[in-house]
Image (cartoon, grey):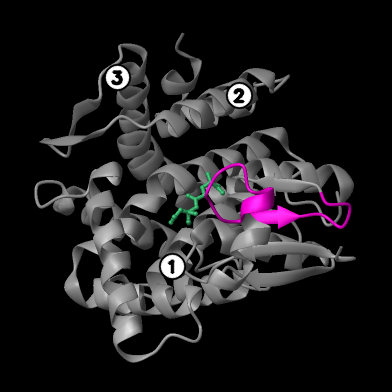
Amino acid sequence: MADVYRIFGAELSPYSVKVRSYFRYKRIPHEWVPRTVHNQTVFDRHAKLPLISLVLAPDGTAMQDSTPIIERMEALHPEPAIQPPDPALAFLSALLEEYADEWGNKPMFHYRWFYEPDQESASTRLASGMNPEATGELLAGIREAVKGRMIPRLRFVGSSAATKDQIEASFHRQLDRLERHLERRPFLFGGRPALGDFGLFAQLYECSIDPTPGAIIRARAPRVLAWIERMLDPAAPGGWERWDALEPTLLPLLRDEVAAVFFPWTAANARALGSGEKEFTLELEGKPFTQETQKYHAKSFAALRARYAAVGDRSALDPILEGAGCRAWLAAG
Ligand SMILES: N[C@@H](CCC(=O)N[C@@H](CS)C(=O)NCC(=O)O)C(=O)O
């Protein structure tokens, strides 16, 4: 048994990188274990789901799913805090994490598996990551198998020729809003990283290491790129900011992405799941957006609503959510 936490993950897995940055920030002794064919047995023994990351604690406890992993570790390692002390800002940070995990994953997955140069690049890195000794024809075969598995999964995130413009417009908007916001601060809520930073950076880090979205980030969002690099091993040089300082550039991200895209999509997914529909369509940017209903997302959305309901005094939070067009989505039955 190891005497430090072991994070089984991959450089190409946003949720793994998110957990790794969290452990680094907290200075929790850990070992990053690239998931390969060589650790299949130990992985299968501990993983309930075939998903990375998998964290094994020194006492053998296995943890999966990045948000609950972070929540559990927070109880043991509360310092440095990853949530602003202001409950309104702490909720916004959790909201941005949810947006990133559930919607921010779409552009990431879309760019990686929709365009050929990205397919080639990602499948090569995934194949050799899982099979470090494979070369030549063996590696080529594994790479084809990876593509054969991942490309059809585009439909799970709703990416298709019909929806690519909506997904890409959202990516550009997200980058532009973030670029403005990060002009004046190193992290989303000021001088130190919050939960929202860990979630959001991880999806964008993956974009930054893929050819097509990486070129877009380099061309139009240098501050976002610098923040992504900071978030790989974050330090906490400064303090938290107040809402009135954050508002001018954080509100546009909440309004134009979280309220305009993420919540309508979330609500449509939850409705479809409730009525047992396998697929749902909603209008985004004046065009239909169709995708398969996602179970996991409805669960995490319910957790977000419960978090909202648990905020004791919402007198500061509600006007912010109202102004951003987010409140009705959280409060509704
Ligand atoms: N909600 C989970 C998602 C984990 C997840 O989707 N992991 C992906 C990689 S990023 C995975 O392991 N996919 C299975 C596969 O590719 O076989 C979390 O936050 O950890």
Q: Is residue 51 left or right of residue 116?
A: right
Percent x, y of residue 309: 63, 18
Please tell me which residue lies in front, 65 or 329.
65
Per the image, label 1 sits on a secondary structure element best described as: helix
Q: Of discs 3 and 2, which sits in the foreground?
A: 3
Give the crowd class for mark 2: few <14, some 14-19, many >=20 residues within 10 Å.
many
> Main SS type for the magenta part?
loop
State the quadrant of the N terminus: bottom right
Residue stretch in magenta: 44-60
Closer to the N terminus: mark 1 or mark 3?
A: 1
Closer to the N terminus: mark 3 or mark 2?
A: 3
Q: Is residue 43 left or right of residue 127?
A: right
Q: Residue furthest bottom?
A: 136
Residue 142 belongs to magenta span: no
Q: Of discs 2 and 1, which sits in the foreground?
A: 1
Q: Is mark 2 within 8 Å of ligand 1?
A: no
The answer to which image quadrant residue 310 occupies is top right
Q: Which residue is mark 3?
A: 272
> What numbered label is drawn on residue 245?
none
Residue occupying image coordinates x 30% and y 15%: 276
Q: Which residue is mark 1?
A: 206
Instruction: Decide if residue 148 is in sight here.
Output: yes
- Which amino acid does the dot numbered 3 rest on? Ala
Is 122 situated above or below 330?
A: below
Inter-mark Cα distance, 1 to 3: 29 Å
Q: Is mark 3 within 8 Å of ligand 1?
A: no
Q: Which residue is mark 2?
A: 308
Percent x, y of residue 26: 80, 62
- Which amino acid does the dot numbered 1 rest on? Glu
Inter-mark Cα distance, 3 to 2: 22 Å
Inter-mark Cα distance, 2 to 1: 29 Å
